[in-house]
Image (tube, grey):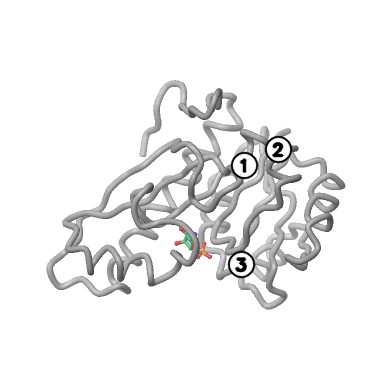
């Protein structure tokens, strides 16, 4: 069985969507949820599902690697994790760490681009569409090769909140689809390129 760790700093709705999508599968499960915030809603959601949790201090990079190694993790999913993944973790799980970002990378990403700021920037730029991106994590924020992207319209009367809500609904479909492709062995990452064999039905 493929063992998945989810790193989350926030409420954990993506975690919830992923767990729900994996509930019926015998070949994969979220077995660990890690946060940098003791009060993160994602930790509470994990506890309610009986999933092991741990809080790591971002200034103690070895703690994250130790927790992931002890749990014999195969895939790492960043779902609203606001910290940089330590290089030793990126290196050890290279090609097996994915992140979901609530915009169409490479635009509207990078340090400081998280939460409503992302959607405010999209609106300020006058974009007619936005969306979500799942990419492979490398040593820079929101930078690794894109695995999947889907779009949503930006409506004329959108606020950052209304756009965020529309994108989040998409995220809850896109992230599980990519993770399922990964556990099925259909995600291929070579020489900085990433692709999903057989596409995605999202
Ligand atoms: C999502 O919008 C995700 O794209 C971003 O942080 C948010 C996490 O939301 N990285 P939740 O904690 O999964 O509800």
In the image, taking residue 53 as reference, residue 144 lies left or right, namely left
Q: How far is mark 1 from mark 2, CA to CA?
A: 6 Å
Q: Secondary structure at mark 1?
A: strand
Q: Which residue is mark 1?
A: 97
Q: Which residue is mark 2?
A: 93
- Residue 9, disc: 3
Q: Is residue 55 visible?
A: no
Q: Where is residue 45 shown, x and y percent of the image? A: 64, 66
N-terminal-most mark, 1 or 3: 3
Quarter of the figure with residue 149: top left
Under 8 Å from ligand 1: the CB of mark 3? yes
N-terminal-most mark, 3 or 2: 3
Q: Secondary structure at mark 2?
A: loop
Q: Where is residue 107 shown, x and y percent of the image? A: 34, 52
Disc 3 crowd rating (10 Å Cα; few below 14, some 14-19, many 20+) is: many
Disc 1 crowd rating (10 Å Cα; few below 14, some 14-19, many 20+) is: many
* Residue under the image location 48 percent in, 67 percent down: 112
Q: Is residue 73 placed above or below 33 in the rendered structure? A: above
Disc 2 crowd rating (10 Å Cα; few below 14, some 14-19, many 20+) is: some
Disc 1 to disc 2: CB gap under 8 Å: yes
């Amino acid at each position: 069985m493929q063992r998945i760790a989810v790193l989350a700093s926030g409420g954990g709705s993506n975690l919830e969507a992923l767990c729900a999508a994996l509930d019926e599968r015998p070949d994969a499960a979220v077995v660990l949820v890690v946060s940098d915030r003791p009060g993160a809603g994602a930790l509470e959601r994990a506890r309610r599902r009986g999933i092991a949790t741990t809080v790591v201090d971002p200034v103690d990079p070895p703690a994250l690697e130790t927790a992931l190694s002890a749990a014999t993790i195969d895939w790492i999913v960043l779902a609203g994790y606001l910290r940089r993944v330590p290089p030793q973790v990126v290196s050890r799980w290279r090609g097996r760490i994915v992140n979901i970002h609530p915009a169409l990378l490479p635009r509207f990403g990078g340090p400081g681009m998280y939460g409503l700021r992302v959607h405010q920037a999209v609106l300020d730029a006058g974009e007619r569409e936005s969306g979500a991106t799942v990419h492979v994590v490398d040593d820079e924020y929101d930078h690794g090769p894109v695995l999947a992207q889907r779009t949503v319209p930006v409506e004329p009367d959108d606020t950052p909140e209304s756009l965020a809500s529309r994108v989040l609904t998409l995220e809850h479909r896109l992230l599980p689809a990519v993770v399922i492709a990964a556990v099925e062995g259909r995600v291929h990452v070579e020489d900085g390129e990433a692709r999903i064999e057989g596409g995605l039905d999202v």
